[in-house]
């Protein structure tokens, strides 16, 4: 009984894998799937092609400010629960570092897409 179940499961897995392979075969070239999506890269060319440094800079700034939002939300709750001077000083220091970094990027011209 157990051996027949194992054989049945193996045959079923083989059938499902072969079915998925046959269904995923490309029948024709689709323009939408082969065109660049958001980053501007052609998906069929070499991965070693140069890319815009501005695109990389915008991606890094997005990650930095996305993490900043994740860290600012707990600061609001720390004011609610702890109500101490140390929580206020720490959060103000954190926000000061973020605003100094933002000011530095603004002065450097990193926030302007076209020079």
Image (cartoon, helix red, strand yellow):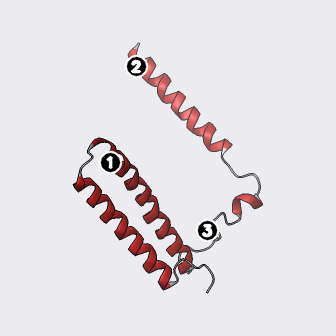
The first of marks 3 and 2 along the sequence is: 2
- Judging by the rendered image, the residue that carries numbered circle 3 is 39
Foreground disc of the pair 1, 2: 1
Left or right: residue 96 versus residue 50 is: left
Disc 1 + disc 3, Cβ < 8 Å: no
Q: Horizontal and vertical percent for residue 79?
A: 32, 48
Q: Horizontal and vertical percent for residue 115?
A: 61, 87
The first of marks 1 and 2 along the sequence is: 2
Disc 3 + disc 2, Cβ < 8 Å: no
- Disc 1 crowd rating (10 Å Cα; few below 14, some 14-19, many 20+) is some
Foreground disc of the pair 1, 3: 1
Q: Residue at x 45, y 18 (%)?
A: 4
Q: CA distance from mark 1 to mark 2?
A: 63 Å
Secondary structure found at label 1: helix
Left or right: residue 13 versus residue 93 is: right
Quadrant in which the N terminus is drawn: top left
Numbered circle sitting on residue 79? 1
Q: Residue at x 66, y 46 (%)?
A: 24
Numbered circle sitting on residue 19? none
Please name whichever residue, 60 or 111, is drawn nearer the observer in this view of the structure: 111
Position of residue 27 relative to residue 95, above or below, is: above
- Judging by the rendered image, the residue that carries numbered circle 2 is 3
Position of residue 12 relative to residue 98, above or below, is: above
């Amino acid at each position: 009984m157990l051996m027949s179940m194992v054989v049945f499961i193996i045959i079923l897995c083989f059938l499902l894998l072969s079915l998925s392979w046959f269904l995923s075969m490309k029948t024709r070239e689709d323009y939408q799937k082969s065109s660049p999506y958001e980053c501007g890269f052609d998906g069929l060319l070499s991965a070693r092609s140069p890319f815009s440094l501005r695109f990389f800079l915008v991606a890094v700034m997005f990650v930095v400010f996305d993490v900043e939002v994740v860290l600012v939300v707990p600061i609001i709750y720390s004011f609610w629960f702890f109500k101490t001077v140390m929580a206020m000083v720490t959060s103000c220091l954190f926000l000061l570092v973020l605003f100094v970094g933002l000011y530095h990027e603004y002065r450097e011209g990193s926030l302007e897409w076209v020079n």
